[in-house]
Amino acid sequence: PAGSTFKPIAAVAAWMSGLIGPGSTRQCTTFFQSPHDFSHHKFFNWGPENSVIGLSKALEISCDTYFYRLGDEFYGRHNLQFQSWIRKLGYGTPPPVDIPGAVGGLVPDPHWKAHYPLFVNGPNPSIDTIWEPGDDIQMAIGQGYLLVTPLQQAVAYSALENGGTVVTPHVVQSITGPDGSPASGGNVAPKPQRQLNLPVSLLDEIKTGLYGATHASDGTSTSTFGNFQPTVYGKTGTAEVPQDCTNCSDAWWAGWAEQNGHPL
């Protein structure tokens, strides 16, 4: 699970699906209850908050309940736009890297849950196989059934930095002959997988939020990157894992660095 490093991805999906836009705000509260959830389950924020904030601030302070609301709005649409945009950014399939071993992770959806053997053959298939509000709500903060790889994170975050180009990762830079001269094929520069044409206004809000997360007084990684050179933009993430141990979690950080306005 990616934890809160996935929040910028949820933001892209929400923006491109029309849930939010320039200047949009949502409540950041101590907990959230979905109007679609008849069990009235409380989804708690990681910290105490009670304010109305925009996307940049939500990323800066990593407000869970802001993103719970977006996940719940996706659930209310019942159209899989959330999963569609997640997959466009490279999740759910193995990255086409030029070495073996890349895996696809998991972008869950109602069809997957309805046919997953563990649920179908479990004690409560009539309940466990149903896509619930909590599935979208938890996915919006990078938890639930979502599984991602570090390479997928790198590809997606590069698209946030470069304007929406989903790159093709590669290890080989060039091919040379035994004498060191360029061989057939020469430099290796694979074409991008796709161009998403993400709006500048969206990317600006995300970048402002990731800068705040590493530099603002309430940023979640300011203590590490606040005075770091070159300038760092990024997001922390801490995902709970269902294991029998105390304080177990999957801890992530994802981002990039820039020198004089250019990515390194």
Image (cartoon, rainbow, N blue to C red):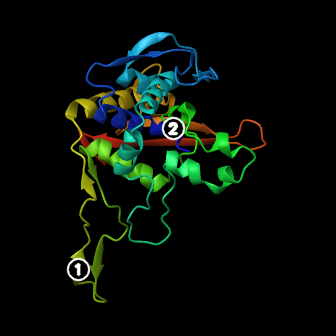
* Residue in the foreground of this view, choosing between 188 and 67: 67
* Residue in the foreground of this view, choosing between 257 and 165: 165
Name the residue at 38% across, 53% down: 90
Q: Residue 227 occupies which quadrant of the picture?
A: top left
159 left or right, relative to 7: left
45 left or right, relative to 8: right
Residue flagged by tag 2: what amino acid is it? Met
Name the residue at 43% across, 30% down: 214
Q: Earlier in the sequence, mark 1 or mark 2?
A: 2
| Alpha carbons under labels 1 and 2: distance apart | 42 Å
Q: What element carries label 2?
A: helix
Query: Badge 1: few (under 14), some or many (20 or more) residues near its Cα, within 10 Å?
Result: few
Callout count:
2
Name the residue at 37% across, 27% down: 209
Does the rendering let one see residue 1?
A: yes
90 left or right, relative to 32: left
Location of residue 37 with respect to 147 vertically, above or below: above
Q: Where is residue 150 in the image (x, y as percent from the top left)?
A: 48, 53
Furthest toward the bottom, the residue is: 178
3 left or right, relative to 188: right
Q: Which of marks 1 and 2 is in front?
A: 2
Name the residue at 59% across, 38% down: 239
Q: Quadrant of the N terminus?
A: top right
Q: What element carries label 1?
A: strand
Q: Where is residue 69 in the image (x, y as percent from the top left)?
A: 46, 24
Does the CB distance between marks 1 and 2 fall below 8 Å?
no
Q: Position of residue 127 (x, y in %)?
A: 66, 39
Q: Position of residue 213 (x, y in %)?
A: 43, 28
Location of residue 227 with respect to 110 vertically, above or below: above
Q: Residue 139 carries which label?
A: 2
Residue flagged by tag 1: what amino acid is it? Gly
Query: Badge 2: few (under 14), some or many (20 or more) residues near its Cα, within 10 Å?
Result: many
